[in-house]
Image (cartoon, grey):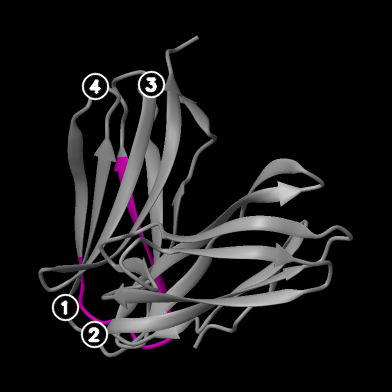
Amino acid sequence: MTARISRYKHPLEYEVSPVEVDTGSNWVTLKLKNIGAKPLHGLDVQLHSLDTFNLTVYGTGLFGAGHYVSDLGSKEEKQMAFRVNAIGPASVYATITGHQDGDSFWWESSLMNIEVASARAEIRRLLVLSNPYTLIGKTISAEATIKGLGKSTGLKLEFWVDLPSGKCDEQATTEIKDLPVGEEARYRAEFTPKETGHYTIYAYLYDGWKRIDRQTDSIYVQSKQ
């Protein structure tokens, strides 16, 4: 199980728990602590999922995934429950709008990972093995690191690239026969860009027909000097 981590971004300390849930409907708790010297007022606290296919945040009622906190004094802590539905791992983040010293402010957390206990594997990271800017005609490698979470024998990894022209091309498909629990394996795909502009690289991990994880990375391709 992934360790729960307290994170800090002024003026708040925050964490989400649990960091591992079962498939289906669950409750997760977002803890906020004001670590600043000044009180915060009129806080609209929202929790968002980066992958709404794998994990959807429903909140506590019929009107969205938000909480209202009238006041959060210096060193004061609040905990808010959010209902989620999970079929796979996903990253979540919190946003807050409110007031401090009479002025409006916006605050956004970093990403917090929530895993699913029954998941067989996950994409730990996807990296484009190049500078953020590269030249047209130069071969680019993308590398996905897969971690085994449970017994699995039928995983599949696909690489797709979104081209500047709007077309999305499949670059590679890899059948993952066996990935022991706790071990990681790396897989690569290569492509040679023929257009200048922004490229988005996708790695999709499937368990049978079901997509269980997804990661993206991007690169900008320039014309030759």
Which residue bears the numbered disc 3?
197
Q: Using the numbered discs, state the Cα–Cα distance from disc 3 to disc 2 in whole angstroms.
A: 38 Å
Residue at which label 1 appears: 154
**Mark 1 nearby-residue class (10 Å; few <14, some 14–19, many ≥20):** some
Q: Is residue 129 above or below residue 3?
A: above
* Residue at screen point 62% across, 57% down: 43
- In the rendered view, does 63 fall on the left or right side of 207? right
Task: Inspect the image, locate mark 1, and give the three-letter code of the amino acid beneath it.
Answer: Gly
Q: CA distance from mark 4 to mark 3?
A: 9 Å
> Height in image: 121 above or below 168?
below
Q: Answer above or below: position of 221 versus 55.
A: above
Of helix, strand and loop, which one carries label 2?
Answer: loop
Q: Comparing marks 4 and 2, which lies closer to the viewer? A: 4
Which residue is outermost to the top? 225
User: How far apart in space, not on screen, are marks 4 and 1 (Cα)?
Assistant: 34 Å
Task: Give yes or no for contact between labels 2 and 1 (Cβ–Cβ under 8 Å).
Answer: yes
Q: Which residues are magenta?
A: 175-190
- The reply to whether the C-beta atoms of the residues labelled 4 and 2 are less than 8 Å apart is no
Q: Which residue is mark 4?
A: 165
Please tell me the numbered disc located at residue 152.
2
- State if disc 3 and disc 4 touch (CB < 8 Å): yes
Kindly report the distance in space between the C-alpha atoms of the residues bearing marks 2 and 1.
6 Å
Secondary structure beneath label 3: strand
Which amino acid, mark 2? Answer: Ser
* Label 1 to label 3: alpha-carbon separation: 36 Å
Whichever of labels 3 and 2 marks the residue nearer the N terminus, that label is 2
Residue 84 shown left or right of residue 224 in the figure: left
Q: Is residue 216 visible?
A: yes
